[in-house]
Image (cartoon, rainbow, N blue to C red):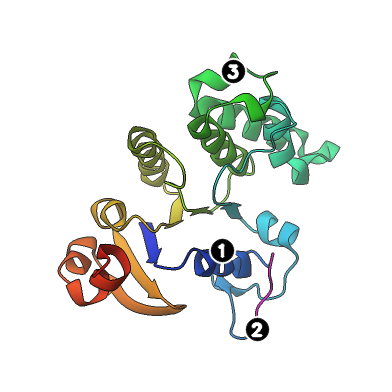
Amino acid sequence: MTLTTATSGKPEINVRFLGAVSNLLGLTGGQVIFDGEDITGWAPDRIAAAGLAHVPGGRGALPDLSVDENLRLGGHLLRSRTKRAQFDEGLAYAYSLFEWMGARRKQLAGTLSGGEQQMLAIARALVLRPKMLMVDELSLGLAPVIVSQLMGVLKELNSTGLTILVVEQHATLAMETAERVLFMEKGQVRFEGRGKELAGRRDLLRSVFLGA
């Protein structure tokens, strides 16, 4: 399994891409194949239950809910009595990802820092223990040191066998971190390969990322 970063020069394309995969926006054409199965048109809850998790761009935590309430909401598909043990296990796993959350269970998410809110959003998505995690614009509005910390967390998760797709405009971050890179421009894949190979493609990067 690989840690993959897709890059694009247009933020709205990123939103549309992951939104279409999760069926939050719908498709105008084509198919979405996940784990060998056509999930095109599936309800978002069904997609999540199939093992595909989505962390939206920006601060994805729900500000008016506490840390604990945010995490519990991430396990809403496991609320039945027959799945109670699975819910408890997923919740405990989410808390184990970031040490600070256990001591701040009752704190409102809206009072957390931007980086902490992003950590909470990632942890919430992992309560269901998905097969694949999609993260939109990890670096949006965050200090470089926080982004580096979050990317380190994603690397550790990836090392456990979790497939991770990060949609990211930060070209350097993408090229240095990802095992496999897809470069998208105006909704079209212009490059697929390793980050160091993309670094040599100035014809692709110049106009979008270098301002030339």
Mark 3 is surrounded, within 10 Å at the Cα level, by few (under 14), some (14 to 19) or many (20 or more) other residues, namely: some
Answer above or below: position of 148 versus 16: above
27 left or right, relative to 188:
right
Q: Secondary structure at mark 3?
A: helix
Which quadrant would the C terminus be assigned to in this image?
A: bottom left
Q: Position of residue 76 (x, y in %)?
A: 77, 42
Q: Residue furthest top?
A: 103
Of 1 and 165, nearer the camera is 165
Instruction: Give the residue number, with chain letter if any, for mark 3.
Output: 102
Answer above or below: position of 209 versus 77: below
Give me the residue at 59% from left, 81% from top: 31
Q: Secondary structure at mark 1?
A: helix
- Whether pointer 1 and pointer 2 mark residues with C-beta atoms closer than 8 Å, the reply is no
Q: Gap between marks 1 and 2, in whole Å? A: 15 Å
Magenta stretch? 24-28
Of 73 and 137, nearer the camera is 137
Q: Residue furthest front?
A: 212
Label 3 is placed on what type of residue? Answer: Gly
Q: Position of residue 124 (x, y in %)?
A: 62, 38
Q: Viewer-nearest of labels 1 and 2?
A: 1
Q: Is residue 27 magenta?
A: yes
